[in-house]
Image: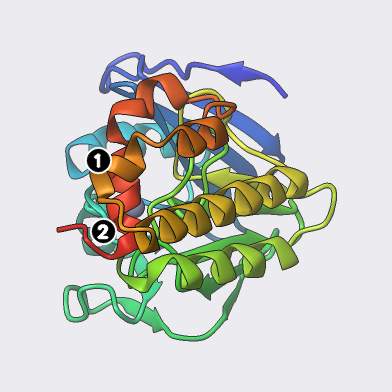
Amino acid sequence: MIWSTPVSATGPDLSDFSSEKVNQHVYVMVQDYGDAKINFAVLVGHNDVVLITTMMKEFNPHVEALIRGISDKPVGYVVSIDGDYYHYYGSRKFVEGGATLIAHKNLIPDVFDNRVLVDEPYRLDVGTEQLHAIPTRAHTLDHMMVKLDNSNVVFAGDALSFDWIVYSGPNGPDAHITALQQMLAQGDKETRFYPGNWVSQQYGSKQDVQSLIRIYSDFVSLVRTEYQQGKSAKEIAQSPAVHDLLEPLKDYHRQKPYIINYVKDVLGQSS
Ligand SMILES: [Zn+2]
């Protein structure tokens, strides 16, 4: 796979972006953003282009320029993985330009006219690829995983991380773990699983997802056990057992001060 920074003669500065051609019709893009990098993807169909997560609104011109560097077909669909600022707020421009939004039914319902709101697995055939948008109960109330059959890739958004553990959000950790198992079941040993954000590992294998599930499940039980023993969230976040478990993860040193937020997330105490 060859990485490149796309060049644009007159358009926006694309120096924070890079693009990887996965195959003839799928490109995975990366935006450098502060300490982290954000994944998104462009799929070229027979008649139109599908944008998988629209990124931040202020980067509409950049995303548009990246698409135009690949194909001059119209953007026919934009797919939302979760409704957060980083992945979804750029959608309006594309929908107003004629794209149909494919999103979880819980995503801010009445924003656009052109939309397909999904509460069960939805399949889109664009000729070159079969796309499956599958609602899950990971991370947010409006999360979907996106699988491309022919390319054997899964875009999991913030439900996954291969550098660190995850926030389970309003569905709680048990629902999140079930969702991770559901994602795992969508893949085989060749599948690439792409998280929404990353620091050092851009994508992972089925084995990496299994290892995330194991570590996150252990973290959840540890937090619950220590809480039952009468410890506060702050005390749990300082517990040697918690640090022993998380220290092998690649982003431990950067995330260490924020472990308390993950403890509170497990205990349902986050604001
Ligand atoms: Zn998110």
**Image height check: is 62 above or below 3?**
below
Q: Nearer the viewer, mark 2 or mark 1?
A: 1
**Image height check: is 64 above or below 32?**
below
Q: Amino acid at mark 1?
A: Asn
Could you tell me which residue is drawn at 85 percent across and 50 percent down? 189
Disc marking residue 25: none
Disc marking residue 60: 1
The one of 124 and 48 positioned closer to us in this rendering: 124
Q: Are there few (<14), some (14-19), or many (20+) residues within 10 Å of tag 2?
A: few
Q: Position of residue 154 (x, y in %)?
A: 63, 54
The one of 196 and 236 positioned closer to us in this rendering: 236
Q: Which residue occupies the extreme bottom position in the image?
A: 120
Quarter of the image holding residue 78?
A: bottom left
CA distance for labels 2 and 1: 12 Å
Which circle's residue, 2 or 1, is located before the other in the chain?
A: 1
Disc marking residue 97: 2
User: Is ligand 1 within 8 Å of the beta carbon of the residue shown at mark 2?
Assistant: no
Q: Amino acid at mark 2?
A: Gly
Could you tell me which residue is drawn at 25 percent across and 40 percent down? 60
User: Is ligand 1 within 8 Å of the beta carbon of the residue shown at mark 1?
Assistant: no
Quarter of the image holding residue 168?
A: bottom left
Could you tell me which residue is drawn at 68 percent across and 45 percent down? 211
For the C terminus, which image quadrant? bottom left
Could you tell me which residue is drawn at 36 percent across and 27 percent down? 256
Left or right: residue 265 versus residue 136 is left
| Residue 27 seen in render | yes
**Image height check: is 193 above or below 147?**
above
Count of labels in the image = 2
Q: Position of residue 47 (x, y in %)?
A: 56, 61
Q: Are marks 2 and 1 in contact (CB under 8 Å)?
A: no
Secondary element at tag 1:
helix
Secondary element at tag 2:
loop
